[in-house]
Image (tube, rainbow, N blue to C red):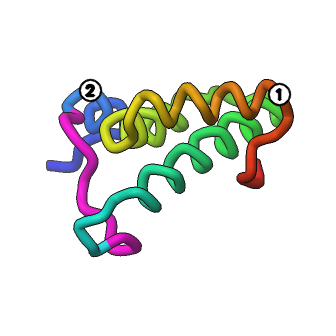
Amino acid sequence: MAETMDEKIKNYRTAPFDARFPNTNQTRNCFQNYLDFHRCNKALSTKGQDVAPCQWYQRVYKSLCPMGWVAKWDDQIENGSFPGKI
């Protein structure tokens, strides 16, 4: 039985395995999902589309990333000094 994206997000517990990041250290996975969330929001908002699919990335990065990092990155985005390309 195939689950819809809404059902997958609703039943989401923790970050699934991502073959791009096979090692135990998940720092890059955390950062990449943070970037993907913001890129997704930006792209869909610009097109005037619903940003609900972007919630997947947000849940993954909130599961993997320390909240101190996320707060720092959010501050850097507001100040225009974030090192990533969004």
Q: Nearer the viewer, residue 72 or 12?
A: 72
* Residue that mark 2 sits on: 10
Query: Which of the 4 image quarters holds residue 17?
Result: bottom left
Q: Amino acid at mark 2?
A: Lys
Query: Which of the 4 image quarters holds residue 71?
Result: top right
Q: Position of residue 84 (x, y in %)?
A: 72, 53
In the image, is 51 to the left or to the right of 77?
left
Name above or below for residue 20 compared with residue 36: below
* Residue that mark 1 sits on: 79
Element marked by disc 1: helix
Q: Nearer the viewer, residue 22 or 44?
A: 22
The numbered disc on residue 33 is: none
- Pick whichever of labels 2 and 1 is earlier in the sequence: 2
Name above or below for residue 5 compared with residue 21: above
Q: Amino acid at mark 1?
A: Asn
Q: Position of residue 28 (x, y in %)?
A: 46, 61
Q: Residue at x 82, y 36 (%)?
A: 47
Q: Residues within 10 Å of mark 2 (few under 14, many from 20)?
A: few
What type of secondary structure mainly makes up the magenta span? loop
Q: Nearer the viewer, residue 74 or 47?
A: 74
In the image, is 44 to the left or to the right of 18?
right
Magenta part of the chain: 12-21
